[in-house]
Image (cartoon, rainbow, N blue to C red):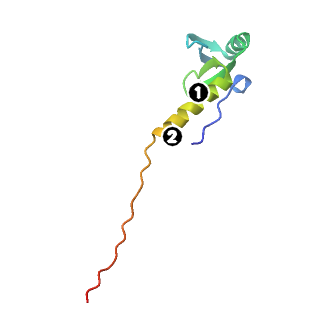
């Protein structure tokens, strides 16, 4: 399962972001500079969670923790995925003597 690269810190291009804090509290819509400054004050990263939303959603958290949680979710999804197997049947012509 290929995962797309998320944008963090200065890679984020949006001017305004809906920011979610480290303890999942909603910080509201902030400019990128304000959100980045808040993340730096907490020694955490600003991670763009949902780039297609209006305004894009970003979360303040440790990037290593974010990647760990994402990999755990993906491995859980893989383990629950049902693998269907097609069984083959051989058709052997019958001979009559």
Visible in this render: residue 14? no
On the image, which quarter does residue 5 sit in? Answer: top right
Q: Nearer the viewer, residue 82 or 19?
A: 82
Q: Which residue is mark 2?
A: 78
Q: Earlier in the sequence, mark 1 or mark 2?
A: 1
**Quarter the C terminus occupies:** bottom left
The local secondary structure at tag 1 comes to helix
Counting from the top left corner in percent of width and height, residue 71 is at 59, 33
On the image, which quarter does residue 52 sit in? Answer: top right
Visible in this render: residue 34? yes
Counting from the top left corner in percent of width and height, residue 91 is at 34, 73
Q: Which residue is mark 1?
A: 69
Q: Residues within 10 Å of mark 1 (few under 14, many from 20)?
A: few
On the image, which quarter does residue 11 sit in? Answer: top right
The local secondary structure at tag 2 comes to helix
Residue at 49 percent across and 39 percent down: it is: 79
């Amino acid at each position: 399962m290929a995962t797309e690269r998320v944008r963090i810190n200065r890679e984020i291009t949006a001017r305004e972001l809906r920011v979610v804090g480290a303890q999942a509290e909603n910080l509201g819509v902030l400019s990128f500079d304000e959100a980045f400054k808040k993340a730096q004050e907490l020694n955490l990263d600003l991670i763009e969670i949902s780039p297609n939303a209006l305004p894009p959603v970003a979360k303040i958290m440790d990037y290593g923790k974010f990647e760990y949680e994402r990999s755990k979710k993906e491995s859980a999804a893989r383990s629950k995925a049902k693998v269907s197997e097609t069984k083959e049947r051989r058709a052997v012509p019958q001979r009559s003597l």
